[in-house]
Image (spheres, helix red, strand yellow):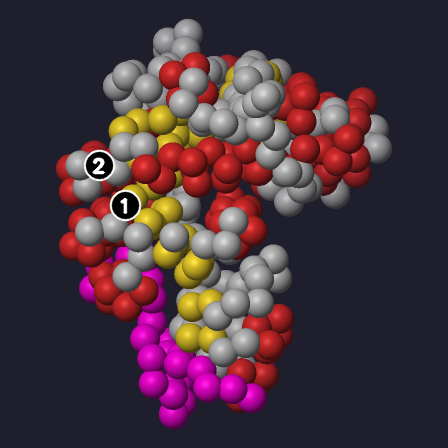
Amino acid sequence: MELLVIGGSGLLGREIVRQAELADHRVTATFHRHRPAELSDRQVTATFHRHRPAELSDRQVTATFHRHRPAESADREVAATFHDRRAGARGRRIDIRDRAAVAGLVADVRPEVIVNAAYQQADWVTTADGGMHVAAAAARAGARLVHVSSDAIFSGRADSYDETARPDPITPYGAAKAAAEVAVRGLVADAAVVRTSLIIGGGESVTERHVRGLATGEREGALFTDDIRCPVHVGDLAAAILELTAEPGVHHVAGADAISRHELGVLIARRDGLDEAALPTASRARSGLPGALAVRLDCEATQSRLTTRLRGAREFLTTPEQGRMPFSRG
């Protein structure tokens, strides 16, 4: 399978690339800042925000740069573009906010499947318009599309949300994600929209870093005891996404346990050998911060179609190896 992963430098994007490479798919990944080392030694097409990392030095690469082309790229043929300072290299600048650039990338790569895992919580254009640009390019190229969405599209007023639930966002990020879903489903009738929750894995997620900072006193803040989500392991989510590339429609892919951010923090602290008693607690309801209190994704319908088992945080944060590789049923 020829696979294009938009947002390949993020936690989820890297794991999708890793698993796809292990399955011997041909992978092209786009990057905002750097290319992760987990990619295999096959030829890779990548885009970069600021610099090309040294780990790319063992292969021919087509790359784009936001500001400058580093000297370490001089030892091979590199197609690159430059945002501020231009050098004598041919190429292009790829930006998910640039509809024409996204279309050009997809036309060049000619993927069978596109997975869009890119987002910026504070940027409507990246999340909403960018999602639309990827969908438009997929439709033009006749590629299958998996669009990764979020439980942020729900208000939390309902006890739980299955795949038929209508979005009712109450934050700008949730509204951007909901708008992207509308665009994706309007442009690509057979797209797969995968809604997920907090992504955990390998100690690299935003949540895991935040918990470590709180436990060690390096960060200020607190973990809400009344903010409920369904955390998912990044390995499980990536495996499910690859399974769903040929499954049109809306899918909910989240962990089996609905737990508070504080309980999640305690599980992470225990796994990492940190002092769970050092984690400050607070109430989101009393904080005045925008956002839903409790969003429980009902994944029963999607799970029935998957081989990958969607484990809960109480399992994957307490089992040996922290479940870094997805488990399958049976």
The residue singled out by tag 1 in the image is: 144
Q: Name the residue rendered at 55%, 33% in the picture.
A: 236
Q: Position of residue 291 (x, y in %)?
A: 42, 24
Residue 143 visible somewhere in the drawing: yes
Q: Main secondary structure of the magenta part?
A: loop
Q: Position of residue 21 (x, y in %)?
A: 52, 54
The residue singled out by tag 2 in the image is: 190
* Quarter placement of the C terminus: top right
Q: Which residues are magenta?
A: 75-101
| Residue 252: numbered disc | none
Q: For this view, does 160 lie left or right of residue 39?
A: left
Dot 1 or dot 2: first in sequence order is 1
Q: Name the residue rendered at 71%, 33% in the picture.
A: 322
Q: Give the amino acid type for the residue marked by disc 2 in the picture.
A: Asp
Q: Give the amino acid type for the residue marked by disc 1 in the picture.
A: Arg
Q: Nearer the viewer, residue 179 or 38?
A: 38
Element carrying mark 2:
loop
Query: Residue 76 magenta-drawn?
Result: yes
Quadrant location of residue 124?
top left
Judge the density around disc 1: few (<14), some (14-19), many (≥20) Cα neighbours within 10 Å: many
